[in-house]
Image: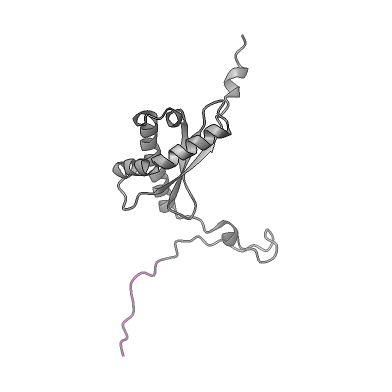
Amino acid sequence: MNRHRDRRRRGASAKTEYPQSTQSLPGDIDPAALFGAAMPAQTRRKLDQLSRQVEERLALVLGGEIDDSHVSALTLLGVEPEPGSGNLVVVLALPVGAGAGEAQLVMRRLDALRPYLRSEIAGAIHRKRTPNLVFRLVPAPTDRGADEGVEP
């Protein structure tokens, strides 16, 4: 009989466990089931780093390397990881005065450019897999605070 004892460190679970509090939570509701387990700090840091790298490269590509006037008129607001998947959500603002027809046209053109954008990102980041891109268009941000302080 082998009496060898495994002395390797038994790694703690990467998931954060939430304490069950009967005062704050009615019934048997587990916050981890509602909101998912908290992400470890290193994983969150790496996702933020990847998002920044992708945002920098997309800003360059969308700003000057694409000859499409509809796509180059978009403003890149940010890149954020989609929870629980390998997708990155690219948030783009439409130009001022763009309608629903313009948004549909831009989405079709972005879908056609997706393979080119992913290849540009693959060259800029050093990862085994290039993340998928999900585009989200929002209306142009309004800057009311700057107009209120100025009197004609």
How many marks overall? 0
Nearer to us in this view, 91 or 24: 91
Whole-percent x, y for residue 100 in the image = 57, 34
Look at 47% across and 31% down and name the residue there. 75
Q: Main secondary structure of the magenta part?
A: loop
Q: Quadrant of residue 13?
A: bottom left
Whole-percent x, y for residue 47 in the image = 41, 48
Nearer to us in this view, 3 or 31: 31
Look at 38% across and 45% down and name the residue there. 50
Q: In which quadrant of the rendered image does the C terminus lie?
A: top right
Whole-percent x, y for residue 108 in the image = 47, 39
Whole-percent x, y for residue 120 in the image = 32, 40
Q: Does the segment drawn in magenta span residue 142? A: no
Nearer to us in this view, 49 or 5: 49
Give the residue furthest to the bottom: 1
Q: Does the segment drawn in magenta span residue 6? A: yes
- Where 3 sits versus 45, above or below? below
Q: Quadrant of residue 143?
A: top right
Decide if residue 22 is on the left or right side of residue 91.
Answer: right
Give the residue furthest to the top: 152
Q: In which quadrant of the rendered image does the N terminus lie?
A: bottom left
Look at 57% across and 30% down and name the residue there. 99
- Where 95 sits versus 147, above or below? below
Query: What is the magenta range?
Result: 1-11
Decide if residue 15 is on the left or right side of residue 65.
Answer: right
Nearer to us in this view, 147 or 60: 60
- Figure coloring: one colour
